[in-house]
Amino acid sequence: MRIKEVILLIIISIGIISCTKISPAAFWLNYKKDFIVKELNNQGPWGGYRIIHWKIKGNEAFEKSDIFNYAKDNGWILIDSCSYNTKLPNSWSFLGKAIFPFNYNKSNNADNQINDKLPRYIYSDFDLYSFRTGWLLVEPGTDESIEKTGFILFSKSRQEMTIYHLWGE
C-alpha cells in the first residue's frame, strides 16, 4: 500500500511542476515585458523549449551589458559569441520559413538535425551569444548531451532580441 502512495505522490508532483511557472528560462518573461512581441513555450516532463522575441521601436535600444547582467543573475553563463551578416542566416530555413538551428556548429553549416524547426524573427545582421544554463540537451536515443542550451540573437541595431532555450531529450 505504501508503494502506491509514493508513486501517486510522484505522479502528482510531476504534474504540478510541469504546469507551473517553475520552468526553464521563465525568468526572461520578466525582462522588459512591454517589448515582448512573441513568446513560444513548449515544456513537458522530458524536455521543452522557450523562445521569446523583443522589439523596441523608435530611438530606444537594448543594452548588451544590461542583458548579460540579467542573464548572469539568473544563472546563464556566457560561453561563446559570433557575429553574422544576413548571408549565412538566410540559408537557415525550412519550407521557406526562417529558422534558428539549435545545433549550430562553428563550421558555418547548420547540423542536419534541426530541432523542432524553431522560428527566427531577426532578419538583419546580428550577434549570437551562447550560454550554459544549468540545463542539458540530450540527443534522443544516446547518452550524448550538451550544456550549451541558451542562445541570444541580438540585432546589430540593438532594437531586436530573441532568446532560445532548449532542454531535455
Image (spheres, helix red, strand yellow):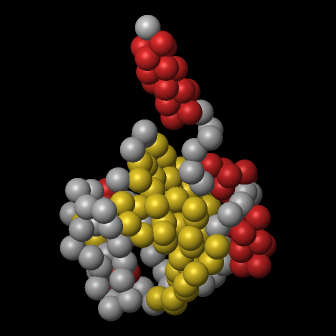
Question: In this orientation, which residue lies closer to the viewer: 115 or 2?
Answer: 2
Tell whether 52 sits left or right of 33: left
User: x%, y% of residue 143?
Assistant: 30, 62
Question: In this orientation, which residue lies closer to the viewer: 86 or 5?
Answer: 5
Determine which quarter of the picture holds residue 102: bottom left
The single residue placed furthest to the top in the displayed view is 1
User: x%, y% of residue 150?
Assistant: 53, 67
State which quarter of the image contains the N terminus: top left
Q: In this orientation, does residue 79 appear? A: yes
Question: In this orientation, which residue lies closer to the viewer: 144 or 108?
Answer: 144
Q: Residue at x 43, y 49 (%)?
A: 48
Determine which quarter of the picture holds residue 46: top left
Q: In this orientation, does residue 62 appear? A: no
Q: Residue at x 36, y 60 (%)?
A: 138
Q: Decide: is 136 above or below 84.
A: above
Q: Decide: is 17 above or below 49.
A: above
Q: Residue at x 48, y 12 (%)?
A: 2
Q: Residue at x 45, y 56 (%)?
A: 167
What is the total number of numbered labels drawn onto the structure image?
0
User: x%, y% of residue 50?
Assistant: 50, 53
Tell whether 124 sits left or right of 101: right
User: x%, y% of residue 98?
Assistant: 35, 68
